Image (cartoon, rainbow, N blue to C red):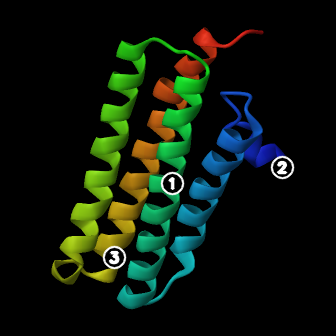
Amino acid sequence: MTKENRKFARVNDPQIDDAHAEIIRTMDEAATVTSKAGLLSVIIDIYKHASVHFLEEEQFMKDQDMPRDFIYEHSGHHIRLRKHIQSVIMDIESYSLDELKKLLNEMKDLMLHHIESVDSRMTEYLDP
């Protein structure tokens, strides 16, 4: 894992930490896309990766016997993030390329916030 990606290693589970880094890396790479069709493809890819990751993360929390209310709250964050990405995909035609890039930056900010403030709380329930 590169120095840049270490900031995402908040859970200290390689699968989760690598998934965080990969999602953010894909979002960063989207900045170079020069067409709406290309950006739509990247956003759909982000949605797919994030959806699989969220399911894996929720299973991880269950496997670690984390409190049910914590898992429920955490899963709610995942639902809101997925719905946000879905809404961009569904309304893609109403945005210009520049607007889509701005929305992608907002998605990245939301994902980073989730990793740093929600996912990082999983460490409270893990053995050192």
Q: Nearer the viewer, residue 97 or 85?
A: 85
Which circle's residue, 3 or 2, is located before the other in the chain? 2
Q: Earlier in the sequence, mark 2 or mark 1?
A: 2
Amino acid marked by disc 2: Thr
Marks 3/2: CA distance? Answer: 29 Å
Helix, strand or loop for disc 2 = loop
Residue type (three-letter) at the residue carrying disc 1: Val
Q: Residues within 10 Å of mark 1 (few under 14, many from 20)?
A: few
**Which residue is rendered at x = 61% and y = 46% of the image?**
20
Q: Secondary structure at mark 1?
A: helix
Mark number for residue 52? 1
Q: CA distance from mark 3 to mark 1?
A: 28 Å
| Residue 82 coordinates in the image, percent (x, y) | 33, 52
- Secondary structure at badge 3 equals helix
When the figure is inspected, residue 120 is found, relative to residue 37, above or below; the finding is above
Picture disc at residue 2 = 2
Dot 3 corresponds to which residue? 98
